[in-house]
């Protein structure tokens, strides 16, 4: 069957699971049930083999040589850039810059804007459910420049209070930095509403796509924001790699704050001329295996299509929420049908740490704690939550097992 | 005469040996032990008595009485409370020198070594360190 014919048909999860070697692991004599994909995803053979193959056959430094290996490595690297650009529907692949990950990308944006475009006293808007990585870089700038962070509040159902955003905007507001999907609640931000306001008030829009890009089609041409960032390791790719997408305007105007070899045209002690395009922002030797592995991961999931993936994971979320509702001791956060693969909950009167520790004994990997969203935890009035997050290889059978064991855990703890 | 650290450790190992591979039984027992933890007084639940590095909160109060060190504690997570109770059972009412030198290999023997892992999730390692430094400080 042609790969194209397969795309966006219903996922054959049994077959997909065979592609992931780690899923056969036993934890405490139980088959691994991996529900911590929000933290990182498992890797298919295709990605693992691509990296092994690179080091076995084509390893060389890139952009730097005339010999065969360096040419092969450079081609593989730049082809990876093209693959990523195509995946996100970006016409000019130079707008895709490879970084060390989402956090690194946000720091590059914040430092660049902080150097050239923000003035002391300027204001930046973030949301209540932001990940620390999309708070701290802005907070640091604000602290050092008498700036202000303004925060979009949440409604009762934990979705963003979009109506309140305009009230936060002043003459000094310059940026809205916002998560596309909440890594703790799974709620999907209505970016069109955010963009509308940003356009009206001429604000720069920075979208943290770390938790959206694994779970849905993201068309950056259509989205048309200033900056979009995400990480490879959350999309079945290697760690240590991510992307920073910037609009054409910023590609030519964002100040360089991480200079180094590879970012230049000419260097002398008197003056340095920086390169154009993506290379300007890619100092030093990059995580070549990470970039090539990332492209392999995208090739892999594009066999199935992001729409099929979204549907599969939505079914899992709805099923899990339905089954969790059977348990009276469960407190669910961010109830909604529009969630991307993530559910946070707590067991009444139990500390999430206890629940997570015992679930692990049954082979079930969940995440407990504040999920790098301490401000959100403060709003929810809890020290942490239990988070389950799904991927293409998770199944309803796994959810059934999880619910069965969760009931047992509640018994053990009472 | 009060028991030595070694003696108490051996007692605990024997208690847990009964469960063999039955980890559910082991954890139930651990949770039970947590219920017998000499609780820290509310007035000592201060910022400086919170053990850092925990997903769950742990409070520890150390006191010297005569030539022995005594510990009271609490935690808001039941399993952590159990681990804390074990540590207090072993190290409380002991001489400072013995506390500082205690190797605490009973934790591995009862199959709960994972709670000593350096992940940020548990503060057991921090707590043991704190108990030992408190013992040192109080003995001066």
Image (cartoon, coloured by chain):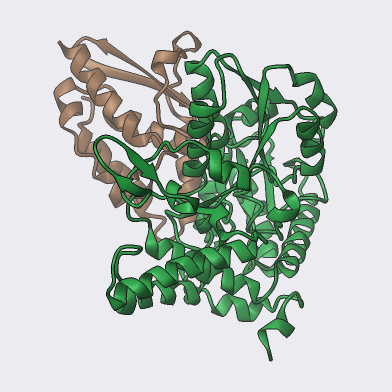
x and y percentages locating residue A273 in the rendered image: 37, 43
Q: Quadrant of residue A129?
A: top right
Q: Quadrant of residue B104?
A: top left
Q: Quadrant of residue B39?
A: top left
x, y percent for residue A407: 67, 52
**Where residue A47 appears, x then y in whole percent?**
47, 72
Q: Write down the colour of chain B.
A: brown
Front residue of this view, candidates A5 and A31: A5
* Residue B123 in picture, x, y percent from top left: 39, 34
Comparing A79 with B136, the one in front is A79
Tally of numbered tags: 0
Question: Quarter of the image containing the C terminus of chain A?
Answer: top right
Using the image as rendered, state which of residue A338 and residue A180 is in the foreground.
A180
> Residue at 37% of width from left, 78% of height from top?
A53
Q: From the image, which quarter does the N terminus of chain A lie in? A: bottom right
Residue A270 seen anywhere in this rendered image of the structure: yes
| Picture layout, residue B59 above or below residue A312 | above
Please say if A233 is above or below B45. below
- Going 43% across and 27% down the picture, which residue do you hit? B37
> Quick one: A274 or A357, which is closer to the camera?
A274
| Residue depicted at x 72% and y 48% | A224
- Residue A93 as seen in the image, left or right of residue A165: left
Task: Check the rendered structure and report the hue given to chain A.
Answer: green
Instruction: Say whether residue A146 is left or right of residue A305.
Output: left
A268 on left or right of A36: left
Task: Specify the farthest residue to the right.
Answer: A163
Residue A232, above or below B57: below
């Amino acid at each position: 069957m042609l790969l194209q014919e397969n795309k966006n048909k219903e996922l054959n999860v049994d077959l997909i699971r065979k592609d992931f070697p780690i899923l056969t692991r036993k934890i405490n004599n139980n088959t691994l049930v991996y529900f911590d994909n929000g933290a990182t995803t498992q890797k298919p053979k295709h990605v693992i083999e691509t990296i092994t193959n690179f080091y076995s056959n084509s390893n060389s430094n890139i952009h730097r040589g005339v010999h065969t290996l360096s040419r092969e490595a450079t081609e593989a690297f730049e082809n990876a850039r093209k693959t990523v650009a195509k995946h996100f529907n970006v016409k000019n692949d130079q707008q895709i810059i490879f970084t060390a990950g989402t956090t690194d990308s946000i720091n590059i944006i914040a430092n660049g804007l902080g150097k050239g475009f923000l003035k002391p006293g300027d204001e930046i808007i973030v949301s209540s459910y932001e990940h620390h990585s999309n708070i701290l870089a802005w907070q640091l700038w604000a602290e050092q420049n008498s700036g202000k962070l303004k925060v979009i509040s949440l409604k009762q159902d934990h979705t963003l209070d979009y109506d309140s955003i305009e009230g936060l905007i002043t003459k000094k507001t310059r940026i809205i930095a916002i998560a596309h999907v909440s890594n703790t609640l799974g709620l999907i931000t209505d970016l069109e509403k955010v963009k509308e306001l940003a356009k009206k008030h001429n604000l720069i829009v920075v979208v943290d796509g770390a938790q959206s890009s694994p779970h849905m089609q993201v068309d950056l041409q259509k989205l048309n924001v200033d900056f979009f960032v995400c990480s490879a390791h959350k999309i079945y790719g290697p760690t240590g790699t991510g992307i920073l997408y910037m609009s054409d305007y910023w590609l030519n105007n964002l100040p360089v704050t991480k200079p180094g070899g590879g970012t230049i045209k000419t260097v002398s002690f008197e003056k340095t001329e920086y390169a154009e395009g993506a290379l300007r922002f890619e100092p030093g030797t990059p995580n070549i295996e990470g970039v090539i592995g990332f492209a392999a991961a995208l090739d892999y999931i594009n066999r199935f299509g992001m729409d099929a993936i979204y549907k599969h994971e939505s079914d899992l979320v709805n099923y899990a929420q339905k089954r969790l509702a059977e348990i009276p001791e469960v407190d669910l956060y961010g109830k909604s049908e529009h969630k991307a693969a993530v559910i946070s909950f707590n067991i009444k009167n139990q500390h999430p740490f206890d629940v997570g520790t015992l679930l692990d004994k049954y082979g079930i990997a969940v995440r407990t704690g504040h999920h790098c969203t301490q401000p959100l935890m403060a709003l929810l009035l809890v020290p942490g939550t239990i988070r389950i997050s799904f991927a293409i290889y998770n199944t309803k059978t796994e959810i059934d097992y999880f619910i069965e064991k969760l009931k047992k855990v509640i018994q053990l703890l009472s | 005469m009060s028991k030595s650290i070694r003696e108490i450790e051996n007692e605990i190992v024997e208690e847990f040996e009964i469960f063999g591979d039955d980890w559910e039984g082991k954890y139930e027992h651990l949770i039970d032990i947590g219920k017998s933890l000499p609780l820290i007084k509310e007035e000592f639940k201060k910022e400086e008595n919170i053990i850092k590095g925990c997903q769950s909160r742990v409070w520890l109060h150390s006191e010297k009485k005569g030539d022995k060190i005594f510990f009271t504690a609490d935690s808001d997570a039941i399993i952590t409370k159990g681990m804390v109770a074990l540590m207090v059972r072993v190290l409380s009412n002991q001489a400072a020198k013995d506390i500082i030198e205690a190797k605490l290999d009973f934790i591995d023997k009862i199959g709960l070594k994972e709670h000593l892992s350096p992940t940020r999730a548990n503060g057991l390692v921090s707590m043991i360190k704190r108990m030992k430094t408190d013992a040192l400080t109080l003995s001066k």
